[in-house]
């Protein structure tokens, strides 16, 4: 009976007449964004002339009502479109429930057939026994005949009983299966009814007509996460980069064998036109910090709901690890702090964003987009020690709230006020004398930065005694549209509404790459195999996790972030244990520790690299010489033989070729002078 009912339901056409209220729809296509998705459904209906009200049911309860669109109306007009969430009515027919009902019916049918088989066997046994009695009464049987009949009856009786027993075992197994299916069906029937969305539409048709409607709308709680596999079979081979998408959704409705498109855009962008208001001039106003170069940048990172634990390293602008950085999951009290080496780990239970904060540095709020998140923090202009500014003091007050801003001091509090001195303005790297605010139009400014007195004096000497304001101007008019890379997937996919990940391969690229070993023993005594490649911009890559495979072995995970990469992108292929590097300080006991009022520190370091491999290698070795940020601290007598010395950053770089089993030693030294009553950390 159930099969007949299901068969009849399948034969019902999708043409719904005007008096019917419920309109079934089918998902035709889904465009998945990094956050959110757009659903396209189709429906066929027949409208009579005049006004007809229909309800499209079984939809997601997470629809953005303002995004609903209907197309394919022909001459029909829309009188109203409303979206509601139905909390009361029973859920639309659940395919899982239907499947269970069909399975139970099939089991019942099998049990009935087996019982019929037993009944026929028992009937055969009765007839068999009756025939045996009749034969014995009506015939004179000799001994041989009786023996033959006895053997025949015994064999057949045994066969019948064995078959009945075997059939009963099958019935018992099927009964257990039916009980299990029935329990599942009962549990699903007792499950709380989930809300569903419905769209009610009032049509006005001039004549009776049939419509093939397309209904599109945006939904929340869906998205895709970029993911990469990067493989290298052996040294100096091209890299194979596989670009994948991890698609998830929890919209309340399964996507069953639908066409999937993936977009790097977002349906939630604010597309309202800007409003230009009047500008009024007054004293004490200055350039707005909205001209920070980061203020107008588009969202780069999107929440990855599959990440349950985040690890990473937090550094300052120079790359130094930052201990004690406070890391909190926004909206919760959960968090952690970085250890002495700047490392951290935090479990993500609730929340979508991590907030990083540290005294004197700008706080950062970043969506949890990867299980590996290395963060570089920047100096906060609001943490200025003290800057002497004249004239437009609010320039610095607006950039550094709470900082003492004053004019030139006087020993006599009652003396005539002196005219304060202006800070040094640096425009696009060039110091400009006599610059005052207003010389540049605000629309020309990309960003404004205020240097602390110490940093300013290091870079610009005595000219920076009154502070330095660095202004970067725009080099061109920005006319960037909404970027939207779209991937149209050829095969259809089924994606259930349970947050399970569906991996979809987008493309595979082969990249020419350079290989070299890298070591920086001052921060890590391991030697890393690295690969560098260019021309990656053409592939529309997005920030995401990358699985690294080298020589057929999984080397680990990294984060591929094209937003922070330069022309070349460098990835680590893992640690090479067959190359060792050591760094040690060579003591110079004959050097003087003090000269007059100064203390002198001599530092000499020895770096030893050994190639234990059977093949030659190319190695990049790095170290550093400290930089002074105070005029009372002098770093002198720097000797860096064989190294390339970046004097602005203090970084040393050696490029070396090592043959199999070869060792090489490099030495560098420097001297630090500073007041003997002060302390420093080397």
Image (cartoon, rainbow, N blue to C red):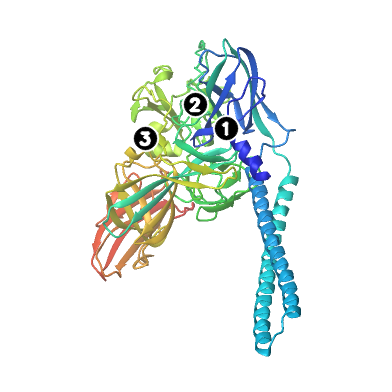
In front of the other: label 1 or label 3? 1
Query: What secondary structure is found at the residue carrying circle 2?
Result: helix
Q: Residue 104: x and y, percent?
A: 68, 52
Residue placed under numbered mark 1 in the picture: 219
Q: Residue 364: x and y, percent?
A: 53, 39
CB within 8 Å, label 3 to label 2: no
Q: Indicate which disc residue 460 carries.
A: 3
Residue placed under numbered mark 2 in the picture: 289
Where 93 falls versus 673 (above or below)?
Answer: above
Q: Determine the CA span between mark 1 and mark 3.
A: 55 Å
Q: Determine the CA span between mark 2 and mark 1.
A: 35 Å
Q: Residue 116: x and y, percent?
A: 69, 60
Mark 1 or mark 3, earlier in chain: 1
Does residue 365 appear anywhere in the picture?
A: no
Mark 3 or mark 2, earlier in chain: 2
Q: Is residue 666 left or right of residue 149?
A: left
CB within 8 Å, label 1 to label 3: no
Where 304 falls versus 53 (above or below)?
Answer: below
Query: What secondary structure is found at the residue carrying circle 1?
Result: strand
Query: What secondary structure is found at the residue carrying circle 3?
Result: helix
Q: Indicate which disc residue 451 carries.
A: none
């Amino acid at each position: 009976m159930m099969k007949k009912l299901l068969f009849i339901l399948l034969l019902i056409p999708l043409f719904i007449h005007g008096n019917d209220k419920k309109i079934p729809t089918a998902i035709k296509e889904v465009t998945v964004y990094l956050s959110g998705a757009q659903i396209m459904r189709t429906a066929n209906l027949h409208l009579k002339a005049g006004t007809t009200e229909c309800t499209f049911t079984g939809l997601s309860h997470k629809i953005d009502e303002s995004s609903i669109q209907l197309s394919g109306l022909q001459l029909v007009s829309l009188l109203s479109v409303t979206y509601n969430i139905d909390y009361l009515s029973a859920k639309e027919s659940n395919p899982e429930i239907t499947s269970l009902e069909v399975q139970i019916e099939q089991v019942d049918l099998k049990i009935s057939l087996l019982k019929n088989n037993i009944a026929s066997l028992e009937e055969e046994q009765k007839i068999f026994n009756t025939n045996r009695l009749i034969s014995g009464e009506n015939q004179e049987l000799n001994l041989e005949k009786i023996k033959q009949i006895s053997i025949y009856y015994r064999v057949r009786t045994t066969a019948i009983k064995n078959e009945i027993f075997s059939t009963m075992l099958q019935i018992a197994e099927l009964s257990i299966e039916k009980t299990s299916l029935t329990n599942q069906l009962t549990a699903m029937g007792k499950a709380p009814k989930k809300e569903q969305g419905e769209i009610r539409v009032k049509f006005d048709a001039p004549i009776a007509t049939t419509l093939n409607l397309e209904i599109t709308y945006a939904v929340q709680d869906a998205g895709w996460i970029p993911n990469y596999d990067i493989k290298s079979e052996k040294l100096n081979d091209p890299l194979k980069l596989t670009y994948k998408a991890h698609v998830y959704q929890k919209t309340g409705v399964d996507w069953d064998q639908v066409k999937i498109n993936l977009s790097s855009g977002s349906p939630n962008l604010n597309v309202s036109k800007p409003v230009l208001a009047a500008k009024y001039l007054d004293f004490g106003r200055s350039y707005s910090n909205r001209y920070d170069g980061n203020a107008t940048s588009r969202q780069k990172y999107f929440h990855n709901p599959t990440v349950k634990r985040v690890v990473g390293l937090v550094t300052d602008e120079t790359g130094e690890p930052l201990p004690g950085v406070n890391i909190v999951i926004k909206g919760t009290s959960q968090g952690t702090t970085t250890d002495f080496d700047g490392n951290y780990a935090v479990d993500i239970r609730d929340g979508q964003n991590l907030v990083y904060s540290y005294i004197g540095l700008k706080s950062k709020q970043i969506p949890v987009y990867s299980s590996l998140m290395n963060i570089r923090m920047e100096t906060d202009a609001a943490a200025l020690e003290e800057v002497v500014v004249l004239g437009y003091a609010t320039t610095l007050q607006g950039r550094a709230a709470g900082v003492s801003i004053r004019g030139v001091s006087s020993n006599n509090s009652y003396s005539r006020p002196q005219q304060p001195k202006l800070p040094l303005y640096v425009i696009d790297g060039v110091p400009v004398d006599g610059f005052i605010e207003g010389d540049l139009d605000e629309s020309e400014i990309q960003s404004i930065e205020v240097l602390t007195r110490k940093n300013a004096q290091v870079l610009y000497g005595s000219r920076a005694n009154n502070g330095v304001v660095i202004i970067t101007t725009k080099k061109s008019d920005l006319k960037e549209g909404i970027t939207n890379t779209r991937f149209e997937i050829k095969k259809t996919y089924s994606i259930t509404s349970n947050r399970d990940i569906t991996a979809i391969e987008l493309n595979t690229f082969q990249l020419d790459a350079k290989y070299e070993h890298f070591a920086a023993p001052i921060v890590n005594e391991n030697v890393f195999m690295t690969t560098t490649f260019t021309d990656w911009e053409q592939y529309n890559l997005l920030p995401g996790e990358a699985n690294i495979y080298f020589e057929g072995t999984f080397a680990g995970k990294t984060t591929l972030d094209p937003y922070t990469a330069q022309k070349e992108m460098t990835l680590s292929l893992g640690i090479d244990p067959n190359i060792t590097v050591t760094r040690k300080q060579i003591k110079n006991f004959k050097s003087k520790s003090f000269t007059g009022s100064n203390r002198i520190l001599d530092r000499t370091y020895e770096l030893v690299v050994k190639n234990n491999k059977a093949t030659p290698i190319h190695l990049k070795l790095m170290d550093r010489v400290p930089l002074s940020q105070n005029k009372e601290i002098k770093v002198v007598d720097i000797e860096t033989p064989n190294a390339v010395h970046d004097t602005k950053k203090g970084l040393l770089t050696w490029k070396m070729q090592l043959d199999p089993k070869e060792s090489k030693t490099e030495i560098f030294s420097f001297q630090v002078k500073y007041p003997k009553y002060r302390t420093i950390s080397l």
